[in-house]
Amino acid sequence: QVQLVESGGGLVQAGGSLRLSCAASGRSFSLNTMGWFRQAPGKEREFVAAQSGWNIYYGDSVKARFTISRDNAKNTVYLQMNSLKPEDTALYYCAARQGTLYSGRVYSSSNYDYWGQGTQATVSS
């Protein structure tokens, strides 16, 4: 089994930055895909970013502002969020699966097997 624990959320003003972390434990050595989704109140869960194999993917709304990275030695994936906007306010979830996801499949939450509990990021205007 795999456990994912997120941290790093908080309250920040518009234009500021946050860095989210997701630490994996358990059978984390086999996680070839790790990513982030977010969900704002009253909205559907939205793809943010993922790294699957050597490929990196971003949602359109965060391109050029967010950066995903991974430290395999620490079994941790990070999401650096810059130039934050009030519409980035959401509960951010870490997600993972053992296999590689290609093309459009990486964007769907249904293709991820493991989820964290989420960390709240709030951006004030």
Image: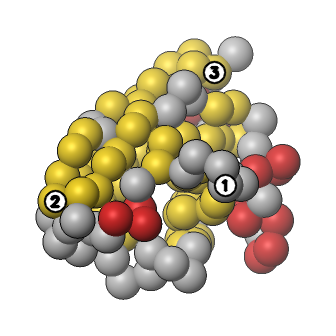
Q: Position of residue 108 (x, y in %)?
A: 78, 59
**Display coloring:** secondary structure
| Label 3 packing within 10 angstroms: few (<14), some (14-19), many (20+) | some
Give the residue type that dot 2 points to: Gln
Up the image or down, 96 lies above or below 81; here it is: above
Could you tell me how far apart the alpha carbons at marks 3 and 2 are, in whole angstroms?
A: 34 Å
The N terminus is located in which quarter?
top right
The C terminus is located in which quarter?
bottom left
First of labels 1, 2 by sequence position = 2
Kindly state the secondary structure of the residue where label 2 is placed.
Answer: strand
| Label 2 packing within 10 angstroms: few (<14), some (14-19), many (20+) | some
Could you tell me how far apart the alpha carbons at marks 1 and 2 are, in whole angstroms?
A: 22 Å
Give the residue type that dot 3 points to: Val
Could you tell me how far apart the alpha carbons at marks 3 and 1 are, in whole angstroms?
A: 27 Å
Q: Position of residue 34 (x, y in %)?
A: 58, 48
Foreground of the two, 82 or 57: 82
Up the image or down, 124 lies above or below 97; here it is: below
Query: Left of 26 or right of it: where is 9?
Result: left
Up the image or down, 94 lies above or below 115; here it is: below
Q: Which residue is mark 3?
A: 2
First of labels 3, 1 by sequence position = 3
In this rendering, which labeled residue sits more in front, label 3 or label 1?
1
Give the residue type that dot 1 points to: Lys
First of labels 3, 2 by sequence position = 3
Q: Which residue is mark 2?
A: 13
Residue 43's label in the rendered image is 1
Q: Position of residue 103 (x, y in %)?
A: 77, 76
- Residue 54 visible? The answer is yes
Foreground of the two, 91 or 77: 91
